Image: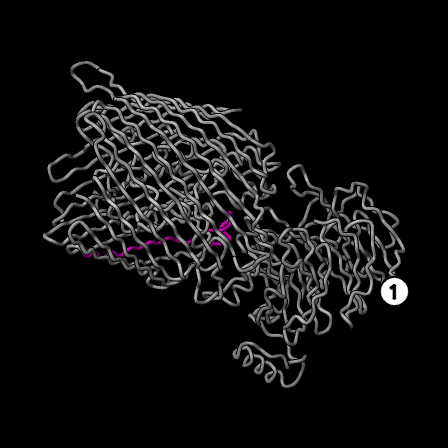
Amino acid sequence: MLWASFALALPVYAQKDSIALDPVTVKGFVPQKFMSGLKIQRIDSASLAQVRYQNIGDILSAYTPIAFKNYGPGQLSTASFRGTSANHTAVLWNGLNINAPTLGQTDFSTIPVAGFDQLSVQYGSSASIVGSDAVGGSILLDSRASVTPFHVSDGRQQESFRNHQSRTDIRYAFPLNNAWAFSGKTALYYGRMNNDYPKPTRNTYALLPTETFQKGIVQDLFLRSQNGQEISAHVWLTDNKLTLTPDDIQGREMTRTTAYRTMVRYQVHTFTLRTAWVRDIIDYAKGDLSHPDHSVTDKFASRIEKDFTLSLGSEVNPVSVKTGGEWTHYRSRVPGYALSPASENRTDFFLLTRWQPATRATISVNLRQGLVTGFNPPFTPSVGLEYGLIQKALYTLTLKGSYGRSYRVPTLNERYWKDLGNPDIRPETGWNKEIGLEQTFKRAFGGTLRSSATFYHNRIKDWTYWNPSRNYRVENLQQVLARGMELQLSYQRQTGSWRTGLDAGYAFNKSSQEKAYDSYSRDIVGKQLVFVPEHTANANAFVQFKYTKLTGQLQAASKRYTTFDNSQFLDGYGLVNLLAETTFAFYKFKLVLQGQVRNVTDTFYLNVRNNAMPGRSFAVSLTFSYDSQ
Amino acid sequence: MKMKRQLASSLAVVFSTLAVWSCNQSDPAPKGDYVSGVFVSNLGNFLQNNGGVSYFARENNTATADVFAAANGTALKGGVQDYTASEQQGIILVDNSVAGQDKVQFVERYTFKDEGTIGAPDIENPREVVIVGRKAYVSCWGTNPDYKYSTGYIAVIDLTTKKVTKKIDIAKGPENLVYNAGKLFVGTTTYTDGNILTVINTNTDAVTQSIPMEGVVTPIGVDANGKVWVNAGIKALRVNPESLVTEATLAIGTDATKVPESFTMSNDMKTIYFVLTAYDANFNPFGKTYKFNITDSQIDLNKPFISRYFTGLTIDPTQGLLYAAVTPSSTQAGYAVRYRGDGNVVDSIKVGISPNGFFFQ
């Protein structure tokens, strides 16, 4: 088959058990088991540990085809997932959407790897499960209960340009009594990017002087009983302060992004209750930094859900069902809003199902209806299917497909910004179709080889647009068609003390505006969206011998258009990073020494501001850990 | 033609020497890819710093979108606020979105080769440039950190040394400049309530007069009779260049929320064209283009010359066509639209992003 010759990819991690799962055993914050037919990529813990001092953008660039629109090191970085805009990637922390409600997006430069324990990437629309924003894909950040009685790690990374990052993690677990066990994690992180570049320019382009400070604390607590009860509490406080041209006392610009994220979750058997409060604060000042513009947005979110099984008779497997609702209240005080505070209520009801009519087949049918103050998003159904075409001991070939509606509720800025906002703006809505094949060779070249090919087609209507030809008033102007394919390949082999592995991906994303809306939009119709590269490639290869590991990373993107008519663009580029690390273990202690060479080839490339990105740079880290086990 | 300038590039020296030699002491024709044509200043999209200077020969209807990039292999890295040229030297005002990155970029006039820059703190938020002899006057808003327009000045540049020799403080955001007979007339940005016409003596580079007027002041130009025309608020004034007394006042309608902009004079210096801009509820500009004769007793707003809004307007001194800049948005290329004297369209040429002015040579 033709596809097999170049069909790569996909660490497939969606569950494919041939037995219907007991719903009680399903842990996890996002109901991934109802995402049949969708592609989910879990980034393994070893890969996360390798970039433990870095931001999430670094690891997503290395392992996924997500393109980032980056303003510079330590500066705003937003995602374009499958050809969509920064508003179309849902970022979930323990199942809660943490995109800033004002902007409807996440600045990935403010999310350090230190903030979560587990990272999964779900490709394509999953609005029926995740809700608003899950149009191009979702990033799932999860906390995990500690399994070791006591673990502590502490370390620091020293980088070129007088930058450094440090982090401390403590994990603990112990039984409280015969019925209850307690576990938890406390993590602290602190980073400072001084960006003291040796030269102010590269190839005549300025390396913009900027400083970024980042600090935060994560606290997770889990109480689990033997009779199926679990209570957990999660807190993530994070603070990120960026200053442009800090030495220019009159012209410097400071943006401080602070988030308090808190959550309590209670689960008893098949019933789950979750309540969360998130406060997002943005302070901005120019020149005099003592009186910044101060924006505060509170989000109160509660969710209730219940799992059960629906019997279809003794001859067939029962249907797993999850049903529930979410209620969210927003209250926002933003200096630029027409009213303060602006408030909004959103309610969602959902019904998720998963059924395995035969061992080879899994079907999910999911339904969601959102209700929002002032208007209602569309009814959002989806259907997903997985079918095992070949299921042999050493080879499996699976067909996956999904068809579903997506939507995006307008952001608070889009509705409430004075003059330029539009209280009557409609939610965006789209239909996403995708189909893919995944294969696994259990013994290929002495290891396990997985590959996948996925094709998608996602048309989004009423795409909101801060219309630059109307002084950036927001309008439901555009209709965007994003289509493309992803090829992924992963390979792992272990022989004796040697381990080798490869993760590689290629993506083609063609994303264009379809609808004319004024006389000059003819220059835009059919053109690739800005900052969405048509081609991206990533590869991550490692060789490990005992406690020493050498890793090479490649990230490449084709040219990124910077204007809607494609008259200007930033050149494509490829970056190579090398990482070498070795672990010294003695008794229950470990010391990990890691060195990195970033941008090995000293490649010149530009960011959104038309400023140069740094050339070759270095980082060294030392991490000490103790594990009681 | 004087050939004694210091040239930045040794290659350029070679070419220039060859040019002089080959012409055998006769007045050499200028050499370069951009000798005779139209230059367009493009503001670009502010945060993307992607403005530039476009160029096309008059007989063509396609443009080189970014001449500086084509000639030097690197972009200007900012929006272009204005472009003009002395005998040999082009001067580009480059405005970057980040403080401290603005500059005056010098280029060889006919090849557009980089000939150096003047940056911060000498140049901050440059707006317009006028050349007087071997000096250039650049209106600058200064650092303007609080957007109160209290840090503005005129930078006086010695074109031989390429150094700022003096800064002349001007309140309320200095903007339009008109030179006439030893006097530089300075207006201010329409973003403020400034109402002072400042007159600078270009021999002493000192402010000699500050004349209060009814509204924000924009000097327009000097007419066929040697009179200076000034826009103040929604009035056009004819000013005696010696006494500085207003001799005639023409009302530009009665709606003070509208802003007359993009003034330009016909080649016989008897007709003045302008765009009357209004803003809708979303601060979105719209409007029409008008003209009046210097002998008119009133401006008839019922008869627009062209029923369109433009972001720049200039008449080509060579052919007399009116060049009008069209900005569909700041995220796609704009157009230069050419009109005949009767208001009929000749053609339109795709240029850079947010075109706002033209320079002809």
Q: Is residue A462 left or right of residue B206?
A: left
* Residue A92 painted magenta: no
Residue A518 spot, x, y in % from top left: 58, 40
| Extent of the magenta region | A548-569
The answer to whether A173 is drawn above or below residue B316 in the figure is above
For the residue pair A112 and A411, the one nearer the viewer reads as: A112
**Observer able to see residue A508:** no
Q: Quadrant of the N terminus of chain A?
A: top left
Residue A565 spot, x, y in % from top left: 51, 48
Q: In this view, does A613 lie to the left or right of B346?
A: left
For the residue pair B79 and A563, the one nearer the viewer reads as: B79
Label 1 marks which chain's residue? B
Q: Which residue is drawn at 34% across and 63% down?
A: A601
Which residue is tagged 1? Answer: B242
Q: Is residue A86 left or right of residue B100?
A: left
The residue type indicated by label 1 comes to Glu
Q: Is residue A394 left or right of residue A286?
A: left
Q: Residue furthest front?
A: A177
For the residue pair B144 and B50, the one nearer the viewer reads as: B144
Q: Quadrant of residue A391?
A: top left
Q: Quadrant of residue B82?
A: bottom right
Asked which secondary structure carries label 1, the reply is loop
* Residue A554 painted magenta: yes
Q: In which quarter of the image is the C terminus of chain A?
A: top left
- Badge 1 crowding class, 10 Å Cα cut-off, few under 14, some 14 to 19, many 20 or more, is few
For the rendered model, the colour scheme is one colour
Residue A592 spot, x, y in % from top left: 24, 55
The answer to whether B53 is drawn above or below residue A429 in the figure is below
